[in-house]
Image (cartoon, rainbow, N blue to C red):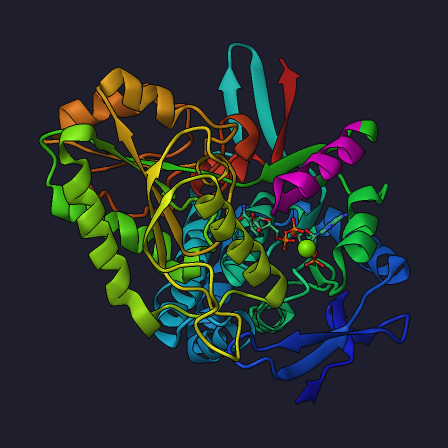
Amino acid sequence: MKAYDGMYIDGAWRPAAGPDVIEVVDPADGQVIATVPAGTVEDVDAAVRAARAALPAWAATAPAERAARLAALRDALVARQDEIARTVTAELGAPLKLSQTVHAAVPIAVAGSYAELAATYPFEERTGNSTVLHEPVGVVGAITPWNYPLHQIVAKAAPALAAGCTIVVKPAEDTPLVARLLAEAMHEAGVPAGVFNLVTGLGPVAGQALAEHPGVDLVSFTGSTAVGRRIGAVAAAAVKKVALELGGKSANVILPGADLARAVNVGVANVMSNSGQTCSAWTRMLVHRDQYDEAVELAAAAAAKYGDRIGPLVNATQQERVLGYIEKGVAEGARLVAGGPDAPRERGCFVRPTVFADVTPEMTIAQEEIFGPVLSVLRYEDEEDALRIANGTVYGLAGAVWAADEARATAFARRMETGQVDINGGRFNPLAPFGGYKQSGVGRELGVHGLTEYLQTKSLQF
Ligand code: NAP
Ligand code: MG
Protein backbone atom coordinates (compact mmCIF):
# COMPACT_ATOMS: atom_id res chain seq x y z
CA MET A 1 0.00 0.00 0.00
CA LYS A 2 1.24 3.44 -0.93
CA ALA A 3 0.46 6.62 1.00
CA TYR A 4 0.68 9.59 -1.34
CA ASP A 5 0.85 12.90 0.43
CA GLY A 6 0.88 15.55 -2.26
CA MET A 7 -1.41 17.25 -4.72
CA TYR A 8 -0.17 18.69 -8.01
CA ILE A 9 -0.50 22.47 -7.62
CA ASP A 10 1.50 25.16 -9.43
CA GLY A 11 3.87 22.71 -11.05
CA ALA A 12 4.86 20.68 -7.97
CA TRP A 13 3.54 18.03 -5.57
CA ARG A 14 2.52 20.00 -2.49
CA PRO A 15 1.35 18.68 0.88
CA ALA A 16 -2.37 19.00 1.55
CA ALA A 17 -3.64 21.64 3.96
CA GLY A 18 -5.48 19.11 6.14
CA PRO A 19 -4.69 15.64 7.55
CA ASP A 20 -7.56 13.64 6.01
CA VAL A 21 -6.98 10.93 3.42
CA ILE A 22 -9.06 8.88 0.97
CA GLU A 23 -8.51 5.12 0.80
CA VAL A 24 -8.32 3.74 -2.73
CA VAL A 25 -9.79 0.25 -2.91
CA ASP A 26 -9.38 -2.49 -5.53
CA PRO A 27 -13.01 -3.55 -6.13
CA ALA A 28 -11.94 -7.01 -7.32
CA ASP A 29 -10.86 -8.01 -3.80
CA GLY A 30 -11.64 -5.14 -1.44
CA GLN A 31 -7.98 -4.45 -0.61
CA VAL A 32 -6.86 -0.89 0.12
CA ILE A 33 -4.14 -0.21 -2.44
CA ALA A 34 -3.25 3.41 -1.64
CA THR A 35 -4.26 6.56 0.14
CA VAL A 36 -4.35 10.07 -1.29
CA PRO A 37 -5.00 13.38 0.45
CA ALA A 38 -8.61 14.47 0.86
CA GLY A 39 -8.33 18.05 -0.36
CA THR A 40 -10.16 20.85 1.40
CA VAL A 41 -11.44 24.32 0.50
CA GLU A 42 -7.92 25.65 1.17
CA ASP A 43 -6.29 23.25 -1.30
CA VAL A 44 -8.86 24.11 -3.95
CA ASP A 45 -8.24 27.79 -3.34
CA ALA A 46 -4.46 27.34 -3.72
CA ALA A 47 -4.98 25.44 -6.98
CA VAL A 48 -7.40 28.03 -8.42
CA ARG A 49 -5.00 30.84 -7.50
CA ALA A 50 -2.18 29.01 -9.28
CA ALA A 51 -4.39 28.51 -12.34
CA ARG A 52 -5.36 32.21 -12.35
CA ALA A 53 -1.76 33.31 -12.02
CA ALA A 54 -0.71 31.08 -14.93
CA LEU A 55 -3.60 32.15 -17.18
CA PRO A 56 -2.29 35.35 -18.83
CA ALA A 57 0.97 33.78 -20.00
CA TRP A 58 -0.64 30.53 -21.19
CA ALA A 59 -3.46 32.38 -22.97
CA ALA A 60 -0.82 34.49 -24.75
CA THR A 61 1.30 31.45 -25.69
CA ALA A 62 1.26 30.85 -29.44
CA PRO A 63 -1.14 28.05 -30.43
CA ALA A 64 1.75 26.21 -32.09
CA GLU A 65 3.58 26.06 -28.74
CA ARG A 66 0.42 24.91 -26.92
CA ALA A 67 0.14 22.24 -29.63
CA ALA A 68 3.73 21.18 -28.97
CA ARG A 69 3.01 20.72 -25.24
CA LEU A 70 -0.06 18.60 -26.09
CA ALA A 71 1.98 16.48 -28.51
CA ALA A 72 4.52 15.99 -25.72
CA LEU A 73 1.66 15.06 -23.38
CA ARG A 74 0.48 12.43 -25.85
CA ASP A 75 4.03 11.04 -25.99
CA ALA A 76 4.27 10.99 -22.19
CA LEU A 77 0.99 9.07 -22.03
CA VAL A 78 2.30 6.61 -24.63
CA ALA A 79 5.43 6.06 -22.52
CA ARG A 80 3.25 5.37 -19.46
CA GLN A 81 0.64 3.27 -21.26
CA ASP A 82 1.27 0.08 -19.28
CA GLU A 83 1.40 1.87 -15.94
CA ILE A 84 -1.87 3.64 -16.80
CA ALA A 85 -3.57 0.37 -17.75
CA ARG A 86 -2.41 -1.40 -14.59
CA THR A 87 -3.51 1.53 -12.44
CA VAL A 88 -7.02 1.65 -13.94
CA THR A 89 -7.32 -2.10 -13.48
CA ALA A 90 -6.34 -1.75 -9.82
CA GLU A 91 -8.57 1.18 -8.86
CA LEU A 92 -11.58 0.70 -11.20
CA GLY A 93 -11.46 -3.09 -11.58
CA ALA A 94 -11.54 -3.13 -15.39
CA PRO A 95 -10.00 -6.23 -17.02
CA LEU A 96 -6.42 -5.48 -18.07
CA LYS A 97 -7.15 -5.86 -21.78
CA LEU A 98 -9.92 -3.25 -21.59
CA SER A 99 -7.63 -0.97 -19.61
CA GLN A 100 -5.02 -1.23 -22.36
CA THR A 101 -7.30 -0.90 -25.41
CA VAL A 102 -9.71 1.70 -24.03
CA HIS A 103 -8.73 3.33 -20.73
CA ALA A 104 -5.10 3.95 -21.78
CA ALA A 105 -5.48 4.15 -25.57
CA VAL A 106 -8.42 6.56 -25.97
CA PRO A 107 -6.80 9.41 -23.95
CA ILE A 108 -3.71 9.10 -26.15
CA ALA A 109 -5.88 9.53 -29.26
CA VAL A 110 -7.72 12.47 -27.68
CA ALA A 111 -4.52 14.23 -26.56
CA GLY A 112 -3.14 13.73 -30.08
CA SER A 113 -6.29 15.13 -31.67
CA TYR A 114 -6.00 18.33 -29.60
CA ALA A 115 -2.30 18.69 -30.41
CA GLU A 116 -3.42 18.83 -34.03
CA LEU A 117 -6.44 21.06 -33.44
CA ALA A 118 -4.43 23.57 -31.39
CA ALA A 119 -2.05 23.91 -34.34
CA THR A 120 -4.72 24.21 -37.02
CA TYR A 121 -7.82 25.81 -35.48
CA PRO A 122 -8.53 29.35 -36.78
CA PHE A 123 -8.39 31.34 -33.53
CA GLU A 124 -9.07 34.51 -35.60
CA GLU A 125 -11.53 35.03 -38.44
CA ARG A 126 -12.92 37.89 -40.52
CA THR A 127 -16.58 38.70 -41.06
CA GLY A 128 -17.50 41.91 -42.90
CA ASN A 129 -15.57 44.75 -41.26
CA SER A 130 -14.82 42.71 -38.12
CA THR A 131 -12.08 40.46 -36.89
CA VAL A 132 -13.45 37.84 -34.50
CA LEU A 133 -11.04 36.55 -31.87
CA HIS A 134 -11.64 33.16 -30.25
CA GLU A 135 -10.13 33.64 -26.81
CA PRO A 136 -9.82 31.23 -23.88
CA VAL A 137 -12.71 31.26 -21.40
CA GLY A 138 -10.26 31.43 -18.47
CA VAL A 139 -9.82 29.12 -15.49
CA VAL A 140 -11.66 25.79 -15.81
CA GLY A 141 -12.86 23.75 -12.85
CA ALA A 142 -13.23 20.10 -13.94
CA ILE A 143 -15.07 17.51 -11.85
CA THR A 144 -14.86 13.99 -13.23
CA PRO A 145 -16.24 10.49 -12.53
CA TRP A 146 -14.57 7.11 -12.13
CA ASN A 147 -16.00 5.09 -15.02
CA TYR A 148 -13.50 6.19 -17.71
CA PRO A 149 -11.21 7.89 -15.22
CA LEU A 150 -8.40 9.07 -17.48
CA HIS A 151 -10.47 9.69 -20.60
CA GLN A 152 -12.87 11.96 -18.80
CA ILE A 153 -10.09 14.17 -17.48
CA VAL A 154 -8.21 14.30 -20.79
CA ALA A 155 -11.46 15.08 -22.65
CA LYS A 156 -11.59 18.29 -20.57
CA ALA A 157 -7.92 19.12 -19.97
CA ALA A 158 -6.66 18.65 -23.55
CA PRO A 159 -9.18 21.01 -25.21
CA ALA A 160 -8.91 23.47 -22.31
CA LEU A 161 -5.13 23.67 -22.74
CA ALA A 162 -5.45 23.80 -26.54
CA ALA A 163 -7.80 26.79 -26.14
CA GLY A 164 -5.37 28.62 -23.82
CA CYS A 165 -7.31 27.98 -20.59
CA THR A 166 -5.76 26.79 -17.34
CA ILE A 167 -7.46 24.08 -15.28
CA VAL A 168 -8.03 22.60 -11.84
CA VAL A 169 -9.20 18.98 -11.82
CA LYS A 170 -11.05 17.20 -8.99
CA PRO A 171 -11.14 13.51 -9.98
CA ALA A 172 -13.56 10.95 -8.53
CA GLU A 173 -12.59 9.73 -5.09
CA ASP A 174 -12.62 6.10 -6.32
CA THR A 175 -10.02 6.68 -9.07
CA PRO A 176 -7.47 9.34 -8.05
CA LEU A 177 -4.35 7.30 -8.94
CA VAL A 178 -4.60 7.51 -12.72
CA ALA A 179 -5.26 11.25 -12.32
CA ARG A 180 -1.93 11.49 -10.51
CA LEU A 181 -0.25 9.75 -13.46
CA LEU A 182 -1.76 12.37 -15.77
CA ALA A 183 -0.31 15.16 -13.61
CA GLU A 184 3.11 13.51 -13.89
CA ALA A 185 2.70 13.25 -17.67
CA MET A 186 1.76 16.97 -17.83
CA HIS A 187 4.92 17.76 -15.89
CA GLU A 188 7.08 15.63 -18.19
CA ALA A 189 5.45 17.29 -21.21
CA GLY A 190 6.70 20.69 -20.06
CA VAL A 191 3.27 22.14 -19.38
CA PRO A 192 4.10 25.32 -17.42
CA ALA A 193 3.48 25.52 -13.66
CA GLY A 194 -0.13 26.38 -12.77
CA VAL A 195 -1.59 25.48 -16.17
CA PHE A 196 -2.73 22.03 -14.98
CA ASN A 197 -3.55 21.45 -11.31
CA LEU A 198 -4.91 18.41 -9.49
CA VAL A 199 -6.79 18.38 -6.18
CA THR A 200 -7.91 14.96 -4.93
CA GLY A 201 -10.84 15.00 -2.54
CA LEU A 202 -14.48 14.28 -1.85
CA GLY A 203 -17.25 15.61 -4.09
CA PRO A 204 -19.25 17.52 -1.48
CA VAL A 205 -16.03 19.10 -0.09
CA ALA A 206 -13.39 19.65 -2.78
CA GLY A 207 -15.81 19.30 -5.73
CA GLN A 208 -18.27 21.77 -4.30
CA ALA A 209 -15.50 24.23 -3.36
CA LEU A 210 -14.25 24.11 -6.94
CA ALA A 211 -17.70 24.62 -8.48
CA GLU A 212 -18.37 27.56 -6.14
CA HIS A 213 -14.96 29.24 -6.39
CA PRO A 214 -15.26 32.79 -7.78
CA GLY A 215 -11.90 32.34 -9.52
CA VAL A 216 -13.33 29.62 -11.79
CA ASP A 217 -14.82 30.85 -15.09
CA LEU A 218 -16.20 27.56 -16.42
CA VAL A 219 -17.24 24.44 -14.56
CA SER A 220 -17.07 21.26 -16.61
CA PHE A 221 -18.71 18.29 -14.92
CA THR A 222 -19.21 14.66 -15.87
CA GLY A 223 -21.21 12.38 -13.60
CA SER A 224 -24.69 11.82 -12.27
CA THR A 225 -27.68 13.96 -13.23
CA ALA A 226 -28.40 14.66 -9.55
CA VAL A 227 -25.00 16.25 -8.90
CA GLY A 228 -24.93 17.87 -12.35
CA ARG A 229 -28.21 19.66 -11.63
CA ARG A 230 -26.75 21.14 -8.43
CA ILE A 231 -23.57 22.21 -10.15
CA GLY A 232 -25.60 23.83 -12.92
CA ALA A 233 -27.57 25.78 -10.31
CA VAL A 234 -24.42 26.94 -8.50
CA ALA A 235 -22.84 28.03 -11.78
CA ALA A 236 -25.98 29.83 -12.96
CA ALA A 237 -26.19 31.79 -9.71
CA ALA A 238 -22.64 33.05 -10.29
CA VAL A 239 -23.23 33.56 -14.06
CA LYS A 240 -20.43 31.08 -14.77
CA LYS A 241 -20.26 28.98 -17.89
CA VAL A 242 -21.06 25.33 -17.36
CA ALA A 243 -20.70 22.10 -19.32
CA LEU A 244 -22.50 18.98 -18.10
CA GLU A 245 -22.03 15.40 -19.30
CA LEU A 246 -24.70 13.41 -17.49
CA GLY A 247 -26.40 10.06 -17.68
CA GLY A 248 -28.09 8.14 -20.44
CA LYS A 249 -30.54 5.36 -21.23
CA SER A 250 -29.65 4.89 -24.85
CA ALA A 251 -31.68 2.85 -27.33
CA ASN A 252 -30.29 0.20 -29.65
CA VAL A 253 -32.99 0.05 -32.35
CA ILE A 254 -32.96 -3.06 -34.50
CA LEU A 255 -35.20 -2.50 -37.53
CA PRO A 256 -36.68 -5.42 -39.53
CA GLY A 257 -34.22 -6.48 -42.22
CA ALA A 258 -31.12 -5.83 -40.08
CA ASP A 259 -28.52 -8.53 -39.44
CA LEU A 260 -30.20 -9.62 -36.21
CA ALA A 261 -27.41 -11.78 -34.78
CA ARG A 262 -24.80 -9.09 -35.33
CA ALA A 263 -27.01 -6.31 -33.98
CA VAL A 264 -27.81 -8.31 -30.83
CA ASN A 265 -24.25 -9.48 -30.21
CA VAL A 266 -22.71 -6.04 -30.68
CA GLY A 267 -25.51 -4.59 -28.56
CA VAL A 268 -24.88 -6.98 -25.67
CA ALA A 269 -21.12 -6.35 -25.86
CA ASN A 270 -21.77 -2.61 -25.77
CA VAL A 271 -23.71 -2.95 -22.50
CA MET A 272 -21.39 -5.45 -20.77
CA SER A 273 -18.16 -3.61 -21.60
CA ASN A 274 -16.66 -1.84 -18.56
CA SER A 275 -19.20 -3.82 -16.49
CA GLY A 276 -21.98 -1.61 -17.82
CA GLN A 277 -20.46 1.53 -16.34
CA THR A 278 -20.71 3.61 -19.50
CA CYS A 279 -22.93 6.67 -19.78
CA SER A 280 -23.48 6.10 -23.51
CA ALA A 281 -24.27 2.34 -23.18
CA TRP A 282 -27.20 1.05 -25.27
CA THR A 283 -29.06 -0.30 -22.27
CA ARG A 284 -32.41 -0.60 -24.06
CA MET A 285 -32.60 -2.99 -27.01
CA LEU A 286 -35.67 -2.38 -29.19
CA VAL A 287 -36.78 -5.32 -31.36
CA HIS A 288 -39.75 -5.78 -33.72
CA ARG A 289 -42.34 -8.19 -32.32
CA ASP A 290 -41.78 -10.69 -35.18
CA GLN A 291 -38.10 -11.09 -34.23
CA TYR A 292 -38.48 -10.56 -30.53
CA ASP A 293 -38.21 -14.15 -29.27
CA GLU A 294 -35.21 -14.87 -31.46
CA ALA A 295 -33.47 -11.68 -30.30
CA VAL A 296 -34.09 -12.51 -26.63
CA GLU A 297 -32.59 -15.97 -27.11
CA LEU A 298 -29.54 -14.51 -28.84
CA ALA A 299 -29.10 -11.86 -26.15
CA ALA A 300 -29.38 -14.37 -23.30
CA ALA A 301 -26.81 -16.63 -24.96
CA ALA A 302 -24.45 -13.72 -25.61
CA ALA A 303 -24.69 -12.53 -21.99
CA ALA A 304 -24.18 -16.04 -20.62
CA LYS A 305 -20.93 -16.32 -22.58
CA TYR A 306 -19.45 -13.38 -20.66
CA GLY A 307 -19.27 -15.27 -17.41
CA ASP A 308 -16.06 -14.16 -15.75
CA ARG A 309 -14.86 -11.86 -18.46
CA ILE A 310 -16.46 -8.77 -17.01
CA GLY A 311 -14.81 -7.05 -14.10
CA PRO A 312 -16.39 -5.96 -10.81
CA LEU A 313 -18.28 -2.70 -10.38
CA VAL A 314 -16.28 0.20 -9.01
CA ASN A 315 -17.41 -0.12 -5.37
CA ALA A 316 -19.86 -1.82 -3.03
CA THR A 317 -22.35 1.06 -3.19
CA GLN A 318 -22.62 0.72 -6.97
CA GLN A 319 -22.90 -3.06 -6.64
CA GLU A 320 -25.81 -2.74 -4.20
CA ARG A 321 -27.44 -0.09 -6.36
CA VAL A 322 -27.28 -2.28 -9.46
CA LEU A 323 -28.48 -5.42 -7.64
CA GLY A 324 -31.35 -3.30 -6.32
CA TYR A 325 -32.34 -2.37 -9.88
CA ILE A 326 -32.28 -6.04 -10.90
CA GLU A 327 -34.61 -6.87 -8.00
CA LYS A 328 -36.85 -4.01 -9.04
CA GLY A 329 -36.98 -5.34 -12.61
CA VAL A 330 -38.15 -8.71 -11.33
CA ALA A 331 -40.67 -7.08 -8.97
CA GLU A 332 -42.15 -4.97 -11.79
CA GLY A 333 -42.73 -8.07 -13.91
CA ALA A 334 -39.82 -8.19 -16.34
CA ARG A 335 -38.51 -11.67 -17.20
CA LEU A 336 -34.92 -12.55 -16.32
CA VAL A 337 -33.28 -14.50 -19.15
CA ALA A 338 -29.65 -14.16 -18.04
CA GLY A 339 -27.91 -13.19 -14.78
CA GLY A 340 -29.86 -12.11 -11.72
CA PRO A 341 -29.87 -10.24 -8.42
CA ASP A 342 -27.46 -12.52 -6.51
CA ALA A 343 -23.79 -11.51 -6.24
CA PRO A 344 -21.77 -14.17 -8.09
CA ARG A 345 -18.75 -14.17 -5.76
CA GLU A 346 -18.13 -13.85 -2.07
CA ARG A 347 -15.43 -11.25 -2.51
CA GLY A 348 -15.34 -8.29 -4.86
CA CYS A 349 -18.10 -6.06 -6.20
CA PHE A 350 -19.27 -8.38 -8.98
CA VAL A 351 -22.68 -8.45 -10.69
CA ARG A 352 -23.75 -11.09 -13.23
CA PRO A 353 -24.22 -10.01 -16.85
CA THR A 354 -28.01 -9.66 -16.79
CA VAL A 355 -30.67 -9.55 -19.52
CA PHE A 356 -34.36 -8.77 -18.99
CA ALA A 357 -37.06 -9.65 -21.55
CA ASP A 358 -40.68 -8.46 -21.57
CA VAL A 359 -39.59 -5.02 -20.45
CA THR A 360 -42.21 -2.34 -21.09
CA PRO A 361 -41.35 1.34 -21.60
CA GLU A 362 -42.71 2.60 -18.27
CA MET A 363 -40.78 0.14 -16.09
CA THR A 364 -38.03 1.55 -13.87
CA ILE A 365 -35.39 -0.56 -15.64
CA ALA A 366 -36.47 1.00 -18.97
CA GLN A 367 -36.35 4.57 -17.64
CA GLU A 368 -33.51 4.94 -15.12
CA GLU A 369 -29.77 4.71 -15.64
CA ILE A 370 -28.64 1.52 -13.89
CA PHE A 371 -24.88 1.84 -14.55
CA GLY A 372 -24.24 -1.88 -14.43
CA PRO A 373 -24.21 -4.92 -16.75
CA VAL A 374 -27.98 -4.95 -17.23
CA LEU A 375 -29.77 -4.97 -20.60
CA SER A 376 -33.52 -4.44 -21.09
CA VAL A 377 -35.05 -5.89 -24.27
CA LEU A 378 -38.25 -4.14 -25.37
CA ARG A 379 -40.76 -5.12 -28.07
CA TYR A 380 -42.13 -2.67 -30.66
CA GLU A 381 -45.01 -2.93 -33.14
CA ASP A 382 -43.81 -0.71 -35.99
CA GLU A 383 -41.26 2.05 -36.68
CA GLU A 384 -43.42 4.81 -35.19
CA ASP A 385 -43.76 2.76 -32.01
CA ALA A 386 -39.99 2.16 -31.97
CA LEU A 387 -39.35 5.89 -32.29
CA ARG A 388 -41.79 6.71 -29.49
CA ILE A 389 -40.07 4.21 -27.19
CA ALA A 390 -36.55 5.29 -28.21
CA ASN A 391 -37.38 8.94 -27.47
CA GLY A 392 -39.45 8.14 -24.38
CA THR A 393 -36.97 8.85 -21.58
CA VAL A 394 -35.60 12.06 -20.04
CA TYR A 395 -32.19 11.19 -21.52
CA GLY A 396 -30.65 11.53 -24.98
CA LEU A 397 -26.94 10.76 -24.99
CA ALA A 398 -26.29 8.02 -27.56
CA GLY A 399 -27.92 5.21 -29.48
CA ALA A 400 -27.70 2.81 -32.38
CA VAL A 401 -29.81 1.87 -35.39
CA TRP A 402 -29.48 -1.30 -37.43
CA ALA A 403 -31.30 -1.78 -40.75
CA ALA A 404 -30.92 -3.56 -44.07
CA ASP A 405 -29.34 -0.44 -45.54
CA GLU A 406 -27.71 2.73 -44.27
CA ALA A 407 -30.30 5.06 -45.79
CA ARG A 408 -33.13 3.50 -43.82
CA ALA A 409 -31.13 3.48 -40.59
CA THR A 410 -30.07 7.09 -41.14
CA ALA A 411 -33.65 8.22 -41.75
CA PHE A 412 -34.61 6.73 -38.38
CA ALA A 413 -31.53 8.19 -36.64
CA ARG A 414 -32.46 11.70 -37.82
CA ARG A 415 -35.66 11.45 -35.80
CA MET A 416 -33.99 10.31 -32.58
CA GLU A 417 -33.62 12.87 -29.76
CA THR A 418 -30.05 12.01 -28.91
CA GLY A 419 -26.50 13.31 -29.33
CA GLN A 420 -24.86 10.35 -31.06
CA VAL A 421 -26.14 7.42 -33.11
CA ASP A 422 -24.03 4.54 -34.47
CA ILE A 423 -25.37 3.30 -37.80
CA ASN A 424 -25.07 -0.46 -38.47
CA GLY A 425 -22.19 -0.77 -35.99
CA GLY A 426 -20.29 2.44 -36.86
CA ARG A 427 -17.06 2.77 -34.89
CA PHE A 428 -16.25 5.20 -32.06
CA ASN A 429 -14.76 8.40 -33.48
CA PRO A 430 -12.64 10.48 -31.09
CA LEU A 431 -13.24 13.57 -33.25
CA ALA A 432 -17.06 13.33 -33.26
CA PRO A 433 -18.89 15.66 -30.85
CA PHE A 434 -20.09 13.76 -27.78
CA GLY A 435 -22.83 15.06 -25.51
CA GLY A 436 -26.46 15.02 -24.60
CA TYR A 437 -29.87 16.08 -25.78
CA LYS A 438 -32.47 16.64 -23.05
CA GLN A 439 -31.31 15.78 -19.49
CA SER A 440 -28.16 14.04 -20.69
CA GLY A 441 -26.31 17.30 -20.52
CA VAL A 442 -25.24 20.69 -21.74
CA GLY A 443 -22.39 21.17 -24.21
CA ARG A 444 -20.20 18.84 -26.24
CA GLU A 445 -16.84 17.17 -25.76
CA LEU A 446 -14.20 15.94 -28.26
CA GLY A 447 -13.06 17.31 -31.61
CA VAL A 448 -13.64 20.89 -32.73
CA HIS A 449 -16.93 21.13 -30.81
CA GLY A 450 -15.11 20.15 -27.62
CA LEU A 451 -12.53 22.87 -28.25
CA THR A 452 -15.07 25.64 -28.79
CA GLU A 453 -16.58 24.95 -25.34
CA TYR A 454 -13.41 26.50 -23.91
CA LEU A 455 -13.43 29.59 -26.15
CA GLN A 456 -15.27 32.89 -26.00
CA THR A 457 -15.47 35.38 -28.83
CA LYS A 458 -14.49 39.02 -29.11
CA SER A 459 -15.20 41.12 -32.21
CA LEU A 460 -13.06 44.02 -33.36
CA GLN A 461 -14.67 46.42 -35.90
CA PHE A 462 -12.54 48.21 -38.47
P1 NAP B 1 -21.29 11.55 -8.93
O1 NAP B 1 -21.53 11.61 -7.48
O2 NAP B 1 -22.07 12.43 -9.83
O3 NAP B 1 -19.72 11.80 -9.14
C1 NAP B 1 -19.13 12.52 -10.21
C2 NAP B 1 -18.12 13.52 -9.67
O4 NAP B 1 -18.78 14.56 -8.94
C3 NAP B 1 -17.12 12.89 -8.68
O5 NAP B 1 -15.87 13.51 -8.82
C4 NAP B 1 -17.76 13.27 -7.36
O6 NAP B 1 -16.89 13.21 -6.27
C5 NAP B 1 -18.24 14.67 -7.63
N1 NAP B 1 -19.27 15.15 -6.71
C6 NAP B 1 -20.14 14.45 -5.95
N2 NAP B 1 -20.92 15.27 -5.24
C7 NAP B 1 -20.54 16.53 -5.54
C8 NAP B 1 -20.97 17.84 -5.12
N3 NAP B 1 -21.96 18.00 -4.23
N4 NAP B 1 -20.35 18.92 -5.65
C9 NAP B 1 -19.36 18.79 -6.54
N5 NAP B 1 -18.92 17.59 -6.96
C10 NAP B 1 -19.50 16.47 -6.48
O7 NAP B 1 -21.44 10.07 -9.43
P2 NAP B 1 -21.24 8.75 -8.54
O8 NAP B 1 -21.84 8.89 -7.19
O9 NAP B 1 -19.81 8.47 -8.54
O10 NAP B 1 -22.09 7.72 -9.38
C11 NAP B 1 -23.52 7.66 -9.21
C12 NAP B 1 -24.26 7.51 -10.51
O11 NAP B 1 -23.88 8.55 -11.41
C13 NAP B 1 -23.94 6.26 -11.29
O12 NAP B 1 -24.67 5.18 -10.87
C14 NAP B 1 -24.32 6.69 -12.69
O13 NAP B 1 -25.68 6.54 -12.91
C15 NAP B 1 -23.96 8.13 -12.73
N6 NAP B 1 -22.65 8.34 -13.39
C16 NAP B 1 -22.65 8.81 -14.65
C17 NAP B 1 -21.47 9.02 -15.29
C18 NAP B 1 -21.41 9.53 -16.68
O14 NAP B 1 -20.38 9.41 -17.34
N7 NAP B 1 -22.45 10.14 -17.19
C19 NAP B 1 -20.26 8.73 -14.67
C20 NAP B 1 -20.29 8.26 -13.35
C21 NAP B 1 -21.50 8.08 -12.74
P3 NAP B 1 -16.80 11.81 -5.44
O15 NAP B 1 -16.04 10.90 -6.31
O16 NAP B 1 -16.07 12.15 -4.21
O17 NAP B 1 -18.19 11.33 -5.19
MG1 MG C 1 -20.26 10.10 -5.60
Q: Nearer the viewer, residue 172 or 356?
A: 356
Q: Position of residue 256 (x, y in %)?
A: 13, 29
User: Which secondary structure class fits the magenta region best?
Assistant: helix
| Magenta stretch, residue numbers | 219-236
Q: Is residue 432 left or right of residue 316?
A: left
Q: Quadrant of residue 461?
A: top right
Q: Which quadrant holds the N terminus?
A: bottom right
Looking at the image, residue 92 sits to the left or right of residue 297; the answer is right
Judge whether 40 appears above or below 123 on screen.
below
Q: In terms of depth relative to the viewer, which is nearer, 230 or 166?
A: 230
Outermost residue toward the bottom in this view: 1
Count of labels in the image:
0
Q: What x and y, as percent, mark residue 352?
A: 40, 64
Q: Quadrant of ligand 2?
A: bottom right
Is residue 222 shown in magenta? yes
Residue 425 picture quarter: top left
Asked whether residue 414 appears in the rendered view, the answer is no
* Vertical position of residue 185 compared to residue 406: above or below: below
| Residue 109 lies in the magenta stretch | no
Q: Given the current orientation, which residue lies at the most extreme top position?
A: 128
Residue at the spot 44% in from the left edge and 47% down from the top edge: 330
Q: Which of 87 and 114 lies nearest the eye of the viewer?
A: 87
- In the displayed structure, 401 sits above or below 95; it is above
Residue 5 picture location, percent across and down? 78, 80
- Residue beneath the point at 48% across and 44% down: 331
From the viewer's perspective, is 399 left or right of 80?
A: left
| Residue at (44, 77) in percent of width and height | 79
